[in-house]
Image: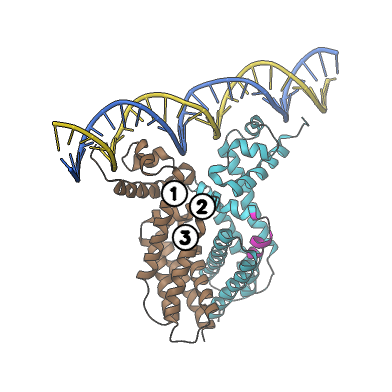
Chain colours: A cyan, B brown, C blue, D yellow
Amino acid sequence: MARVPAAERRNDLVNAAIHVIASHGVEGATTRRIAEEANAPLATLHYCFHTKELLFEAVIERLTEQYREVLIENDVHGDVAATARGVLRGLLNWYLEGDPDLASATIELVSWAQRQKDHPAVSVYSEAFNVMRSILARAASGQEVAPETIDQIGYVVGALSDGFAVNWLTYADRSQAAEQAETIVGVLDAWLAANLA
Amino acid sequence: MARVPAAERRNDLVNAAIHVIASHGVEGATTRRIAEEANAPLATLHYCFHTKELLFEAVIERLTEQYREVLIENDVHGDVAATARGVLRGLLNWYLEGDPDLASATIELVSWAQRQKDHPAVSVYSEAFNVMRSILARAASGQEVAPETIDQIGYVVGALSDGFAVNWLTYADRSQAAEQAETIVGVLDAWLAANLA
DNA sequence: GAGCGACTTGATCGATCGTTCAACTTCGGT
DNA sequence: ACCGAAGTTGAACGATCGATCAAGTCGCTC
């Protein structure tokens, strides 16, 4: 077969793993299915990733990176309220219009990673939270906002986007989810207005 | 061994399955592990539930029932705002102080059920939503509240509790989660105040 | 063109999976 | 005392899992 550098193969396998996890769940994501999705023999998967666990850790790194990009891309560089609003909107739009496999695989893998030795699950959330905090902190640099308020806003934005995602992934109804996204943003607006006054 | 009626055995197996799913995930919830947790031989599991899938469906029924009980128990019989607030508080408290296996197993199984033929996943959410709607509708009987507003409130309460649960199950930090629960209730309050005025 | 590291792959391993079966024991009704 | 229904259970089935290995093939360097 056509020769492929290991780095590129690893990339293909990570993409295949995300797709298989999203459509078959962690328990259905077998090494054979992932290899087949990547058009590679089973032995090639183990040539690139010594164990299945190492492959899954690479998938988690990829997902972590994806979240960071989405957050940074949606930094509107406004005041705290506008920035929080923009980040939340960016997340909801990403769920709605981006690759649905990414959100689905994230939910699947986070509970999987929770049970691994040095649970790398937290890394996805903690990293996303850290990025959000730094974005919000810069937006608040000109205002009088307590650090703990920044953290609280970050938590609320995260919780709202998670709550939205769970329902969206459960029902998979796009038009309904679009309305719900508006509702969610309205909830954030109401809370910000009441707490940043 | 001591003779046990099938109905009672089925009950034990459902409880064992919930515990195993919560601690080992759906992919780690093997028939042998569940049978061992229930102190029953493997063959007994298949005597009570013809297949593993049927056992999992029984687990989903149990979880659905649990949610209904929590919602009904926390109906404060006040106006719409007070009722929504009470139900949300009840859910958050149930997550925080109830059996952590129940919430964890729910999250695990919902994504599993999503991939079954006649995805029974939706039943947990839809049933919970229906109960919530009927509770809110009765609370609104004396007020002027549009039916679609009732649904919207139900969605927001659900989304907030889901968002709370995801973070709580990820970090498992009780004291932090207790503060976050207060924040979540505050978010609902702000939104209700802005939208029911 | 010889040599070597990088990559490919079919075949196969032992472990574990969900499920089945038949033999066995207990219990309630007659 | 007898009998059939209900419950128990060890042993085993074929399928599939993650992982391994050895025998390749390709492409670059000297």
> Between residues B107 and B58, which one lies in front from this camera angle?
B58
**What amino acid type is highlighted by mark number 2?**
Ala
Q: Secondary structure at mark 1?
A: helix
Within the image, what quadrant is residue A174 found in? bottom right
Residue at the disc numbered 3: B124
**What amino acid type is highlighted by mark number 3?**
Val
Within the image, what quadrant is residue A144 found in? bottom right
Pointer 2 or 3: first along the chain: 2
State whether residue D2 is above or below residue B133. above
Q: Secondary structure at mark 2?
A: helix
Residue at the disc numbered 1: B56
Q: Is residue B105 visible?
A: yes
> Left or right: where does residue B55 sit relative to residue C26?
right
Dot 3 falls on which chain?
B
State whether residue B175 is above or below residue D10. below
Find out whether the residues at labels 2 and 1 contact each other: C-beta distance under 8 Å. yes
Give the CA distance from mark 2 to mark 3. 10 Å
Instruction: Specify few, some or many for label 3: CA neighbours under 10 Å numbering under 14, 14-19, or 20 or more.
Output: many
Chief secondary structure of the magenta span? helix
Q: Secondary structure at mark 3?
A: helix
- Spot occupied by residue A108 in the image (x, y as percentages of width and height): 55, 50
Q: Is residue B95 visible?
A: no
Report the magenta residues as a range.
A91-100
Find out whether the residues at labels 2 and 3 contact each other: C-beta distance under 8 Å. yes
Dot 2 falls on which chain?
B
- Spot occupied by residue C25 in the image (x, y as percentages of width and height): 22, 32
Q: Residue at x 63, y 39 (%)?
A: A34
Pointer 2 or 1: first along the chain: 1
> Left or right: where does residue B113 sit relative to residue B15?
right
